[in-house]
Image (spheres, rainbow, N blue to C red):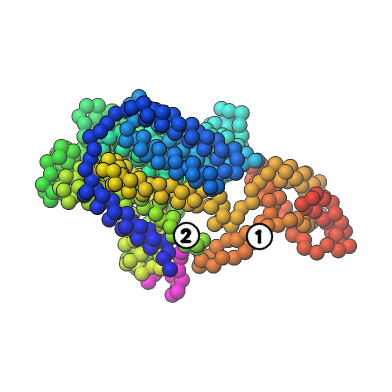
């Protein structure tokens, strides 16, 4: 049986081979323009994407047949339009992409309008106390300041919406994060490829890559956003003499902010050092005379100083907080220990399996994970064969692939049963997106048959990506054990029960309707658990208001020794006589 980890390699090899072949055979078309049919198609695409976003947010529309039909049509239309729309229509096309992203990344607005996730207890602490203390961190690596919690706290004070309100979190903060990430990946792609079309397609590829979904871990991806801005400024500072000093200042400020947002930002300190290595390789091994490579080698002392400065900022944060000692360094130590000393992993026969394999996720999901990296690999291979590889393409690609490949090297050396494809690897995938987008532009313009095949590669990824647990909130909840969906009735009943708990000091017992769910053990075994929406509602209210609940004993058999103190259609509460 093919596991998800093996499917990643299988699909990556297949897509890279196909795209390399298409790139070698493609003959770019010179046709350009912005004709009236394209304008009409653009307007229709915008309204179709807008309708899809509205239906996704308002109704139980996601993962239905009409949803997938609408998704494929809008994906195809956006992809084709990106090749033809000029500057006048680019704004409306970007708005269409944003609506299309809402279809993919969002789901129906919850009835209770409550949005809680990892790290929300830090937001609650800030709102409640008005200050931040290191001991309140979700884990020590979020110190000295959890930036996302700080932003949401500020929005809580600035608006009339509470910090846990869905519209505040998703409609204000998350939507702003998506727009900022879109504009940044567009700018980075345009900087290194010189193509606005590639910039638009970079947004499309980013959205179709499940492991780069910014909504699943906003702390990490807000930090990664700042890393991309810092990298963009670094490229501009090295490649252009004009306003280079301003670019350096922006780079340092962005990187320092990224380090505050999330510890994985420290990985970007490798980029300046990798640029020098690739510069020497380009000049000597490839015999390239590209200005960017020459500039990096000629300015190697300045580039090394920049890298050292970024490293000092990263180390300063590590020294200032205990997070690196207590959280980050042990993770890095475990990685190298498993890589070079596999016998020290643990008792014989003990194995760890990633969540996707424990949950039995269909290996077909790996297709969407590797589409963008495979396109980027095909571009680099093609350009190397033609000896026309661009310096920044090669620099960004090599820097990213070193960390992505390390997960597989670790598994190979340690003879582990599966691959630990962790965040230290996939935070580098956005650095591959620009090359993947440029490869997509070339094959889409490479002739009618080649264009159809390459468009099909993208269209296949769209429904697969939307069904991935890293994108679909429904699938994520399913593999986490089928978390109950809260309703207004659940919250109303929970409030009534909380009042009862305040007035009754005796031991209470609850009997309620429960639904079956399941969870996964580290060994991969699936176990059945019972879930109850009322219990979820009680825990949610207690968390929001920071209330410690007395434990309610579950009651299965009722006899004369118990008296009923609360009753509804779905649950009853008893206490001993």
Magenta span: chief secondary structure = loop
144 and 204: which is toward the camera: 204
Tell me the element at label 1: strand
- Residue 370 higher or lower than 186, as above or below: below
- Residue 519: tell me if it is visible: yes
Q: Quadrant of residue 163?
A: top right
Name which of mark 1 and mark 2 comes first in the sequence: 2
Q: Secondary structure at mark 2?
A: loop
Query: What is the count of numbered marks?
Result: 2
Residue 339 percent coordinates (x, y): 34, 64
Answer yes or no: do the residues labelled 1 and 2 have beta carbons within 8 Å? no
Percent x, y of residue 283: 12, 45
Task: Choose top left, top right, bottom left or bottom right for residue 113.
Answer: top right
Q: Which residues are magenta?
A: 343-356
**Who's the residue at 58% across and 61% down the image?**
519
Lateral position of residue 26 relative to residue 327, left or right = left
Alpha carbon distance from label 1 to label 2: 22 Å
Visible residue check, residue 436:
no
| 362 relative to 240 in the view: left or right | right
Q: Would you name the residue on which mark 2 appears?
A: 362
Q: Residue at x 24, y 48 (%)?
A: 23
Q: Which residue is mark 1?
A: 516
Place of residue 402 in the rendered image (x, y in percent of width and height, measured from the top left) = 29, 54
- The residue most toward the bottom is 348
345 in the magenta segment: yes
Left or right: 485 with respect to 554?
left
For disc 1, the neighbor class at 10 Å (few under 14, some 14 to 19, many from 20) is few
Q: Residue at x 56, y 27 (%)?
A: 158
The crowd level at tag 2 (other Cα within 10 Å; few <14, some 14-19, many 20+) is some
List x then y, in percent, for residue 456: 37, 48
Answer with the quarter of the image where residue 241 lies.
top left
Give 384 or 250, whichever is nearer the viewer. 384
């Amino acid at each position: 049986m093919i596991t998800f980890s093996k499917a990643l390699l299988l699909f990556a090899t297949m897509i890279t081979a196909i795209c390399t072949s298409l790139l070698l055979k493609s003959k770019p078309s010179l046709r350009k323009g912005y004709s009236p049919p394209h304008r009409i198609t653009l307007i229709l695409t915008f309204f179709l994407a807008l309708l899809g976003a509205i239906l996704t947010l308002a109704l139980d529309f996601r993962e239905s047949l009409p949803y997938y039909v609408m998704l494929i049509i809008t994906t195809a239309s956006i992809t084709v339009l990106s090749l033809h729309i000029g500057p006048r229509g680019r704004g409306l096309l970007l708005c269409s992409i944003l609506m299309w992203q809402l279809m993919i990344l969002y789901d129906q607005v919850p009835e209770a309008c409550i949005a809680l996730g990892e790290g929300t207890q830090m937001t609650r602490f800030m709102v409640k106390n008005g200050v931040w203390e290191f001991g309140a961190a979700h884990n020590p690596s979020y110190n000295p300041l959890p930036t996302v919690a700080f932003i949401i706290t500020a929005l809580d004070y600035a608006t009339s919406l509470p910090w846990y309100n869905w519209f505040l979190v998703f409609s204000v903060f998350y939507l702003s994060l998506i727009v900022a990430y879109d504009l940044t990946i567009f700018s980075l792609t345009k900087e290194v490829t010189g193509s606005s079309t590639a910039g638009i397609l970079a947004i499309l590829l980013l959205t179709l890559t499940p492991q780069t979904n910014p909504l699943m871990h906003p702390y990490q991806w807000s930090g990664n956003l700042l890393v991309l801005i810092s990298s963009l400024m670094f490229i501009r500072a090295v490649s252009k003499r004009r306003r280079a000093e301003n670019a350096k200042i922006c780079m340092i400020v962005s990187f320092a902010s990224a380090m505050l947002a999330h510890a994985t930002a420290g990985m970007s300190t490798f980029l300046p050092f990798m640029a020098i290595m690739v510069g020497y390789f380009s000049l000597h091994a490839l015999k390239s005379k590209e200005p960017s490579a020459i500039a990096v080698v000629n300015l190697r002392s300045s580039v090394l100083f920049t890298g050292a400065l970024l490293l000092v900022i990263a180390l300063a944060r590590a020294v200032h907080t205990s997070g690196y000692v207590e959280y980050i360094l042990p993770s890095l130590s475990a990685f190298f220990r498993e890589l070079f000393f596999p016998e020290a992993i643990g008792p014989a026969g003990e194995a760890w399996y990633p969540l996707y394999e424990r949950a039995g996720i269909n290996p077909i999901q790996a297709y969407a994970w590797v589409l963008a990296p495979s396109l980027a690999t095909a571009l680099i291979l093609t350009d190397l064969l033609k000896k026309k590889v661009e310096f920044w393409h090669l620099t960004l690609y090599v820097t990213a692939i070193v960390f992505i490949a390390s997960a597989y090297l670790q598994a190979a050396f340690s003879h582990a049963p599966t691959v630990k494809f962790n965040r230290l690897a996939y935070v580098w995938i956005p650095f591959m997106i620009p090359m993947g987008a440029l490869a997509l532009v070339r094959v889409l313009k490479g002739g009618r048959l080649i264009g159809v095949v390459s468009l099909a590669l993208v269209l296949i990824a769209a429904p697969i990506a939307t069904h991935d647990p890293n994108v679909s909130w429904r699938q994520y909840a399913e593999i986490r054990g089928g978390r109950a969906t809260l309703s207004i009735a659940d919250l109303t009943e929970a409030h009534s029960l909380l009042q009862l708990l305040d007035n009754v000091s005796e031991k209470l017992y609850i009997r309620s309707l429960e639904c079956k769910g399941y969870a996964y053990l580290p060994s991969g075994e699936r176990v059945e658990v019972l879930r109850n929406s009322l219990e979820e509602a009680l825990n949610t209210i207690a968390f929001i208001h920071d209330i410690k609940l007395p434990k309610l004993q579950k009651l299965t058999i009722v006899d004369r020794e118990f008296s009923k103190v609360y009753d509804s259609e779905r649950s009853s509460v008893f206490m001993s006589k």
